[in-house]
Image (cartoon, rainbow, N blue to C red):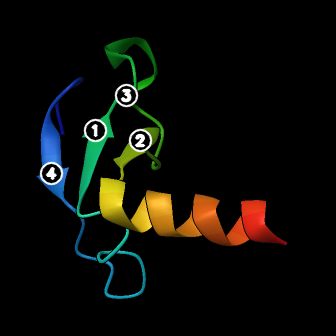
Amino acid sequence: MAQFDVYKNSNKNTHGAYPYIVDIQSPLISELATRIVIPLGNISHSLKIMETELSE
């Protein structure tokens, strides 16, 4: 994974809400066996969550 590359989210539990992820891990810590990523959310899913929470 290269820094700032975008990937399809292969996790079946979260793919609906977050279909893509962006790798933000610096090459300076590339020896770690983990990655730091930002999920890219589906706006319609996010709006449904906000509507539900605001109406409570």
Left or right: residue 7 versus residue 16 is left
CA separation, marks 3 and 1?
A: 15 Å
Q: For numbered disc 4, what is the local secondary structure?
A: strand
Task: Select label 3 or label 1 by which is in front.
Answer: 1
Identify the mark at residue 7; answer none if there is no mark. Answer: 4
Identify the mark at residue 5; answer none if there is no mark. Answer: none
Contact? badges 2 and 3 (CB < 8 Å): no
Q: Residues within 10 Å of mark 2 (few under 14, many from 20)?
A: some
The residue carrying mark 3 is 30
**For this rendering, which residue is in front, 3 or 30?**
3
The residue carrying mark 2 is 37
CA separation, marks 2 and 3?
A: 13 Å
* Image quarter hosting the C terminus: bottom right
**For this rendering, which residue is in front, 49 or 17?**
49
Name the residue rendered at 47%, 58% in the picture.
47
**N-terminal-most mark, 4 or 3:** 4
Contact? badges 2 and 1 (CB < 8 Å): yes
**N-terminal-most mark, 2 or 1:** 1
The residue carrying mark 1 is 22
The amino acid marked with disc number 3 is Ser
Left or right: residue 28 versus residue 23 is right
CA separation, marks 4 and 2?
A: 10 Å
CA separation, marks 2 and 1?
A: 5 Å
Residue farthest to the front?
55
Left or right: residue 18 versus residue 2 is right
Q: For numbered disc 2, what is the local secondary structure?
A: strand
Name the residue rendered at 37%, 28% in the picture.
30
The amino acid marked with disc number 4 is Tyr
Task: Select label 2 or label 3 by which is in front.
Answer: 2
Q: Residues within 10 Å of mark 1 (few under 14, many from 20)?
A: some
Contact? badges 4 and 1 (CB < 8 Å): yes
**N-terminal-most mark, 2 or 3:** 3
